[in-house]
Image (cartoon, rainbow, N blue to C red):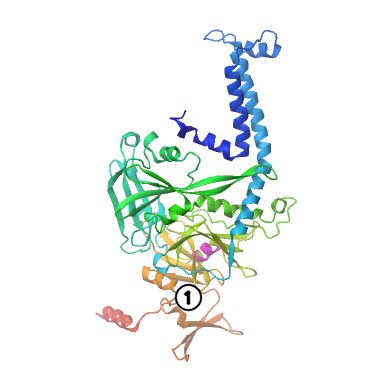
Amino acid sequence: MYVLRPLFHPIFYDMLNSPGALIFWTLTLLTVTVLWFLPPLDTEDSRAAAAVAALFEETDRGEVNSSVIVKLALVVGVIIVALVLAGLYSVPANALEERTLAEQTMAEGEPVENFPEMNADNARIVPRSVADVQSRGSVSYRQYRLGTSDIARMEDGRLAWSYPIQPDGFRNMLFENQQGVLLSDMTSMEDQEIQAFDDTPFSVGEGMLLHRGSSWNLRKSDFWAKYNDDAIEFVHDGKPYMAYPKTGHEWHLTPIPHTTPTWEGVALIHPDGTIENLSPEEARNSEVLEGQRLYPLYNTNRKMESLGYREGIINQMGTIGSHENEVEVASLPQGAGNKQPFVVDLKSERMSYVTTMEPYGADTRGLDEVWFIDSRTGEPTYFESKRQTLTGPERAMGIVRSQDSQTGWGDNFVVVEPIPVFVDGQLWWHSKVVPVDSTDITRHVFVNSANKEALTVTSTSEVKAFLRGEDVNGTNDIDTEPAPGEDNVEYYIVIEDEDGTVIQRIPIGPGEEPSVKYVPAEETAQNESQASG
């Protein structure tokens, strides 16, 4: 059992960190152990035991020991009772877990008056679906394949989609080794850079079965931790590594025993199979892990989901709850290609987990709060919209589609990966328009969460310029004015020179959706010259 302990990890971990599992497994294992060592039961004077034994007396294998049958029946009975007791206890225990976790999160959370500044040079420009297609189309491995992608920092500070180069096929999973990692730059849509570090075999890695796999060895190295997050593959000084954030649990004895998740540090796997189990402080001070994500996404997600209980257990109940100040994680439509929490890079290369919260209710999609969890410390901060209505990701994606009624949405193109970005103190939703086969990026659309303004850009330089708060295509020089009483005119586009003098007013009719584009004079002259030629 000690040699094979990774196989029993889920059972023993849950026994010590889940009250319901503790009840079920304790009763079941105690019963099995006692009955195993008990002498054969006397079933001759027991009508019930005799009836059970009679069902199995005549089989094609001969007579079955009635004592064994009775013991098995007792085990089944205890399992049923244990399941019922564990289920009954788990109802209040799970509610208390959510309530305690919500209280902890609110106590740790620091409210902020303004949104933080973005790292404009590290925008998430390439969505995961496009990176997967382009990365897999750029490599040729016969015995290996690219595993699940995750977000890591490259050595020069850029964000990348990272992949393990893992064995492909049952035989190779048994005998071959992970061959390093691959990094796909996500900060540029032109000439996307892909770096393959595929000449460093991992003694312990992803896609390797049994005792050679990372999961088996992680459980051996620290049995009393859980590894709910995917591996973070990255490179330091030209050498590939993998990091696994670790989750633990903390017991609370009142009002009844229950547990809440905690952060236990990071497991760092070297290519030679060495596993460093680092505490949170050791991980933050590690030169190898500098700039990388450390805090578990799982813990972040659990904290955000628990916030619905911050006003109490009864408050969130469906029938008797008042739902006062109750929030829930904002939903993303099917096909969005990502989920919360979002991973974004803030100023000074600080990766943060961002979660947008909407009011409780089936018909509410505006945002109440935006939470930020520091990916290296786990410290939470949050922005309250108060009475201001902010557009959520689902509505923002709808606005993107409504901007272009000529596009065959769903048939030819889709809107994917809405990501929150912060420009001049405002929240914008950054979505990407890609073909259905995810082979490229057609354009980027930013939707202002406050006024639903939409801005379309088509290049990396324009995306970064917008995130820096700069004018894009001269759009900030264009203003509009209402047209009260004018027939067939909803408003005017007003064009002014740099002194504020009105040059022209362009009438816009109801239902029209003009696209304004700034074209330099020299470019216009060049196009006219080419046309005449």
- Residue, x 44% and y 30% (percent of image)? 4
Q: Which residues are magenta?
A: 394-400
Can residue 137 be seen by looking at this rendering? no
* Residue 392 rendering spot, x and y as whole percentages: 56, 63
Image quadrant where residue 437 sits = bottom left
List the residue tagged with mark 1.
514
- Above or below, 462 relative to 16: below
Image quadrant where residue 202 sits = top left
- Residue, x 63% and y 33% (percent of image)? 23
* Residue 509 rendering spot, x and y as whole percentages: 53, 78
- SS for callout 1: loop
What type is the residue that disc 1 sits on? Pro
* Residue 211 rendering spot, x and y as whole percentages: 38, 34
Can residue 194 be seen by looking at this rendering? yes
* Residue 443 rendering spot, x and y as whole percentages: 41, 65
User: In the image, is 347 to the left or to the right of 136?
Assistant: right
